[in-house]
Image (cartoon, rainbow, N blue to C red):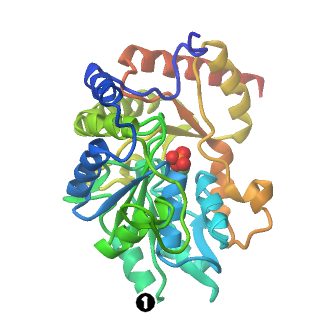
Amino acid sequence: MTHPWRISLSSPDIDHHDRAAVDAVLRSGRLAGGPAIGQLEQLASDTFRRPTVSCSSGTAGLILALRALGVSGGEVITPALGFIATAHAIRAVGATPRFCDVDRETLCVGLEQLEAAWSDDVSAVIPVDLLGVQVPIDAIVEWAKQRAVPVIEDACEALGSRHGDSPCGAAADAAVFGFYPNKIITMGEGGLVSCRDQALADRVRQLANQGRTAGGFCFEGEGYNFRLTEMQAALGASQWLRLDALIERRQHLAHLYLERIESIPGVVAAPAPTSSGAGDRRSWFAFVVLLEDPRWRAPLREDLAKHGIETGLYFPSIATFAPYDESPSASLPVTEQISPRMLALPLHPRLKPAQIDEVVATLEESLGRIRLEG
Ligand SMILES: Cc1ncc(COP(=O)(O)O)c(C=O)c1O
């Protein structure tokens, strides 16, 4: 089947090395629990400079991290502006999400928002590196330490983001990455949990593997099958070797968008381009624009779709979805104002500059018409 979109929102970048790596696994006959997983975990541990365990998805990684840190109830603070998987993971371990707002510039949670959401029932916090922009993780870790609650960084969108020399995923008690095909690198599905120490990593591994404590039939406590396959790990390890180049390509394309949208009235990039500091590297998981008027969004999406251009709603407030509309929450003025005005435009390493020109020209033309009619 051909892809329905001429210019798709995201696309995995699979090259001949990736195909050869997966093919080698298939030919070996060892499809689970083998050397590819070891290689992937080594690459990840070297990057984050601490023990890292693979698992079947970002959601599984969040569940494992919560469980391994002993969270099985209470309230877990997380931003309402994000992907619903974070709330699902909190619920899955028997805890309740408690929503906080985000900073207007970065679209990420900071100390001010955590402080406003604090309650005596809080058992953990999950800040999210939204769209690849890192939260102020060192300050959050320090803040949480004073309150004796663990921090799990949801870094599913931020593989390769960096604050100076410090890689995203190296500071919180646990940091979780996801590898769905729209992510910076992909394994089809997959996840990683970067852990503060070996004891936590051992616990995550045990939980991900049926509670197995050693080879053979030794089990202790609860467990899941949240393991990665060898095919996934081989693809992930092969892609990992190109991580810097893939991010540079995303960066280059995002900067083309930034230049081109500058002259369009009523449209700005979100988060603000300045929200990543001088020494920071942002993964550029997505390129999102903020429309001045939320009523423009539906007709604009429709126009872009007519031209074969896919867009995405990154992100509706999680607190608006039925499972979570009764969840405890701080007030969410920024999330509520910003979320209905956000629109993600196509961004992936295979996108061509000429396609960015086309997306922006179509957007400008469509908005001109919508404003006239409105
Ligand atoms: C912020 C965030 N958290 C969690 C997830 C869940 O990851 P996965 O789809 O690998 O379970 C995603 C994936 O889209 C995400 O963007």
Across and down, in percent, residue 279 comes to 22, 55
31 with respect to 269 (left or right): left
Across and down, in percent, residue 139 comes to 37, 76
User: What amino acid is found at the position of numbered circle 1 in the picture?
Assistant: Gln
Look at 67% across and 26% down and name the residue there: 300
Q: Quadrant of residue 196?
A: bottom left
Residue 107 shows in the view: no
Across and down, in percent, residue 192 comes to 39, 54
Across and down, in percent, residue 259 comes to 37, 30
Neighbor class of circle 1 (other Cα within 10 Å; few <14, some 14-19, many 20+) is few
186 with respect to 343 (left or right): left
Secondary structure state at the residue bearing disc 1: helix
Q: Most extreme residue toward the front, as rendered? A: 217
Residue 61 shows in the view: yes
Q: Is residue 74 above or below residue 263?
A: below
Q: Is residue 40 above or below residue 122?
A: above
Q: Which residue is mark 1?
A: 146
Q: Nearer the viewer, residue 224 or 351?
A: 224
Q: Quadrant of the C terminus?
A: top right
Q: Quadrant of the N terminus?
A: top right
Q: Is residue 98 above or below residue 284?
A: below
Q: Quadrant of residue 215?
A: bottom left
Look at 57% across and 23% down and name the residue there: 363
Q: Quadrant of residue 21?
A: top left
Look at 63% across and 25% down and name the residue there: 367
Number of numbered discs? 1
